[in-house]
Amino acid sequence: MSSVPPNMPPGGYDPRTQWRVYREQQRAAWRAQRDAWKAQQYAYKAKFQGAYGPRVPSVVGPLILVAIGVVWLLIYAGRIAPENFWTWYGKWWPLMLIAAGLAMLAEWALDLRREAPVRRGTGFVGILILLAVIGFFASGTTRGMWGPWRGDWGDHDENNFFNMFGLPEHDLEQQVLKVQIPSDAAVHIENPRGDVSITAGDSPSIEVQAHEVAYAGSEDEAKKIFDAEQAHVTVSGSAVLVKSDSNNNGRLNLTITVPKSAHITVHSGHGDVTAANLDGGANINSNHGDVHLSVIKGSVQVHFSSDKGDFSAHQIDGDLTAEGNCNDLTLSEITGKVTINGELFGDVHMENVTGQIHVHTSITDMDVATLPGDLTLNSDTLRVTQAKGQVRVTTHSKDVDLSQVYGDSYVEDRDGRIAVETAGNYAVEAKNRKGDVELTLPPNAAASVSGSTRNGDIVSDFPLAVSGDESKTVNGKIGAGGPKVTLTAENGDIHIKRGDDVPPLPPTVAGPASPAAPHLKAPKAPPAPPVTQ
C-alpha cells in the first residue's frame, strides 16, 4: 500500500463552519481596531483639554439670533419700515462687530477667573461674516455705489430718520415759483422724495412752494443736496411739468396751487400725496406713501407700487380706480363707479357710493350695484350694510355678513360663516364649503327655498320640510312662493330665520346741479413759448 494519504479533506471538515468562524474573527478584529481608534481620540482630547481646557459655548451666537429675531418681528409687525432699517443698517453695521468684540472680551475676563482653563466656541463667526457682508452691500446701496439699485433704498416718510442716527437736519425754503398757465392745463408732477400737496386757486397760474430738507454733516454738503433736489417748472403750451431730482440724503416737500379745472398727474416716490378742490380729475402713482383726495370732479386713477401706503378719497364726483398693493383704504361720497384691483393688506371702509363697486383681490371678488350704506373688509370679515341692487361675493377664510340687502345676493365662501339678511323678496344663493349659512327673511317673505347640508343641521323658523340624516335637505315655499332661495353648506349648519320688518330704503338726495358753462368761442391766439424756471 502507498504511504501517501488520499487527496481529500480529513474526516469532520465543514466549510460553512470554517467560513462562519472566519467572519467572526474579522468582526472581532474590526471592533478591536475601532475601540483602539476611539481610545486614541479620547486620549488626544483629554490631553488637549488638560492643556487648554474644555470647550464652552459663547453667548455671542445666541445674542445675534435674538437680535435678528427682534428686528424681523418689528419689521413684520410694521413697527419699523424695511427701507428705513436697511438705510440705518448700511451706516451703522460696524457697531455689530464692536458689540460682538466687547462681549468676547467680557467672556475672556470671566474665563481668567476660572480655576480650570476653558475654550470658547467660535461657531458664530460665520454669521458675523455674513451680516458684515450684508452691511457692506447695504452701505454701498444707500451711498449710491450700486447704480440702478440706489433708488430702491431710503426713507419712507420719517422726516427725522437720519438725524435720529447722527446726521443733522438742514432746512431751506425755496423761492416761490409762479407761472401763468392755461386754466385747463395738464399738470405733471414728479417728486422722488417728499410730500406733494395740491390745491386749487382762483387765477390761471401755477404756484410752487418748496420746502427742502437735507441730512448732511456740514453746510456745504447740505447746499449740494439743496441744489440737486430743487424743483423746476416747465411750461409748454397746455402741458406743465413740475420736477425734482432724487437725493437719498434729502427730501423736497411741495405745496402746489393750480387752476381749478386743471388735470393733475403725480408720480411720487417716497412721500404722501394730498389733493383737494379740483375739477379736472387726478392720476396718482405712489410708490411709498399715503394718498388723500377730497372734493374732486372727474375721473380719479390711483396706482400703488407697495403695501405701505393708505388711500382715502371723499366727495369724488366721477369714477374712481385704484390698482396695486394698498394698506388701509377709505372711500365715502363717491358718485361714480369704484374699481379696486390689487392686494389690500389693511382695513377697507366704504360708504355712500352711488355707482357700482367692484373689488378684486387674490382672496375676494365682490360686486355691489349701489351702496347707500357702508362696507367693511379686513383680513377675516366682510360686512355690507344697506346695499341696493345685486350683491355678489366670492371669497374664502372670511365671515361674510350682508344685511339690509335691497336686491339679489350671491355669496360663495370657504372656511368662514355666511349671514345674509334681505330687505324684501329677492333671490338668494349662498354656498359655503366649510361653515354655517344663516339667512334672515322678513316676516312676510315670499320665496321658493331649496337647500342642502352635509355633516350639519337645518333649522327653519318658517314651515319648511326638512329631511335626511347626515346629509339633510330642505324644500318648500314661504308664503305664496317667490324668488328662488338656494342654500348649500358642507360641514356646517343652515339656519333660516324670521327677521323683523326692514324699513324702505331712503331716497337718494341729489345735490344741486352745477351751472352750465357758457358756450363762448375763444379767440385764436398763438401758442405760448416754453417757459422754464
Image (cartoon, rainbow, N blue to C red):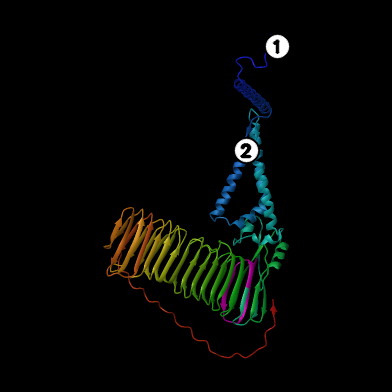
Front label number (1 vs 2): 1
Could you tell me residue 25's position as x and y percent?
A: 63, 21
Mark 2 and mark 1 in contact (Cβ < 8 Å)? Answer: no
On the image, numbered disc 1 is attached to which residue?
4
Residue type, label 1: Val
Residue type, label 2: Ser
Marks 1/2: CA–CA distance: 79 Å
Specify whether residue 210 is painted magenta. Answer: yes
The numbered disc on residue 340 is none
In the shown orientation, is residue 90 left or right of residue 352? right
Image quadrant for the C terminus? Answer: bottom right
* Residue 176 can be seen in this image: no
The numbered disc on residue 58 is 2
Q: Main secondary structure of the magenta part?
A: strand
In the shown orientation, is residue 298 left or right of residue 385? right
Could you tell me residue 165's position as x and y percent?
A: 64, 55
Q: Which residues are magenta?
A: 189-212
Could you tell me residue 141's position as x and y percent?
A: 68, 57
In the shown orientation, is residue 491 left or right of residue 8? left
482 and 120: which one is in front?
482
